[in-house]
Image: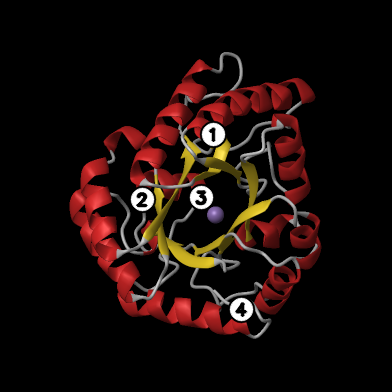
Amino acid sequence: MPRLGAHAFVWEAEWTPATARRVVASAAAAGLDFLEIPLLEPGTVNVQATREVLAASGLGVTCSLGLPLGASLTEPPQAGIAFLEQAVDVAAELGSALLTGVIYASLSEPPQRPVGPREFDAIADSLRRVALRAADRGVRLGIEPVNRYETSVVNTAAQGLELIAAIDEPNVVLHLDTYHMNIEEKGFGPPIRSAAANLGYVHLAESDRGVPGTGNVPWDEVFEALADIRFEGDLAFEYFAGVNPLLARATCIWRPLVPSGDDVAAATAGYLRDRASGHGLRI
Ligand code: MN
């Protein structure tokens, strides 16, 4: 049965031992199964404290990131590979079976030009090395296509599947996000169905990155397709009540898009579970 979780920035904009306690308590109170912890700066995560607070709550964990400026996977790829290897190690130490997100590009600068085949292949080569290390540690990698204003590398499910095929390692999965799909895809059902064999993770995010259920995403189409493919991966809702400066710049969030408050998260979990169960998808 798929698990329902949420991104930690639903509550707080940074991950410290103090915010971890509050976020984990709130996520557990909202009835969630797991928490997605951002590893934007993996070296700063207090692994021991995080493990303790998660273990006490019974919540599962998943990790995500976007590459920082300078962590290139191409010419030369060493900095990007080193960053991802550290993130893989931290994810494994936290008990996460997945490291996902924009692991293939930096979100710190707007894209300037299309990515050619040589650069695409170089990214795939770098990610293959990271995938082997991740496999050793029992971690899968997720490729999250994001919209054209954030990257020129992977915007659609089809491009994500192309990158996964080029990496050619069994522990790499596709991670779709309904916010980005609303910008880049022709509908929601076709890309979800086309990715059935590779889809490992889904971000349930609204068209304006606000609270799911308040915008233009056709949730019935999303959940019907996920039910049709008998999706067994994890689903996380994603919005950012806590505005992290790195993430705000990467995602161009310039105004508050969600009310703060734990009741919003609990209501969102209830809303998404209701809509999913209407299509026979129990989360
Ligand atoms: Mn996302």
Q: CA distance from mark 4 to mark 1?
A: 31 Å
Q: Amino acid at mark 4?
A: Ala
- Comes first in the chain, label 2 or label 3: 2
Horizontal side of 68 relative to 232 (left or right) equals: left
Q: CA distance from mark 3 to mark 4?
A: 27 Å
Horizontal side of 15 relative to 227 (left or right) equals: left
What's the mark number on residue 276? 4
Task: Check disc 3 and report its element: helix, strand or loop.
Answer: helix
Crowding at label 1, few (<14), some or many (≥20) Cα neighbours within 10 Å?
A: some
Q: Residue at x 65, y 72 (%)?
A: 217
Q: Residue at x 69, y 31 (%)?
A: 167
Task: Check disc 1 and report its element: helix, strand or loop.
Answer: helix
Q: Which residue is mark 2?
A: 244
Residue 2 visible? The answer is yes
Q: Amino acid at mark 3?
A: Thr
Q: Residue at x 60, y 14 (%)?
A: 75
Residue that protrudes farthest toward the left in the picture: 18
Crowding at label 2, few (<14), some or many (≥20) Cα neighbours within 10 Å?
A: some
Q: Nearer the viewer, mark 1 or mark 2?
A: 1
Q: Amino acid at mark 2?
A: Asn
- Comes first in the chain, label 4 or label 2: 2
Ligand 1 located in image quadrant: bottom right
Horizontal side of 108 relative to 158 (left or right) equals: left
**Residue 34, horizontal then vertical, whole percent:** 41, 62
| Mark 4 CB within 8 Å of ligand 1 | no
- Comes first in the chain, label 3 or label 4: 3
What's the mark number on residue 135? 1
| Proximity of marks 1 and 3: CB atoms separated by less than 8 Å | no
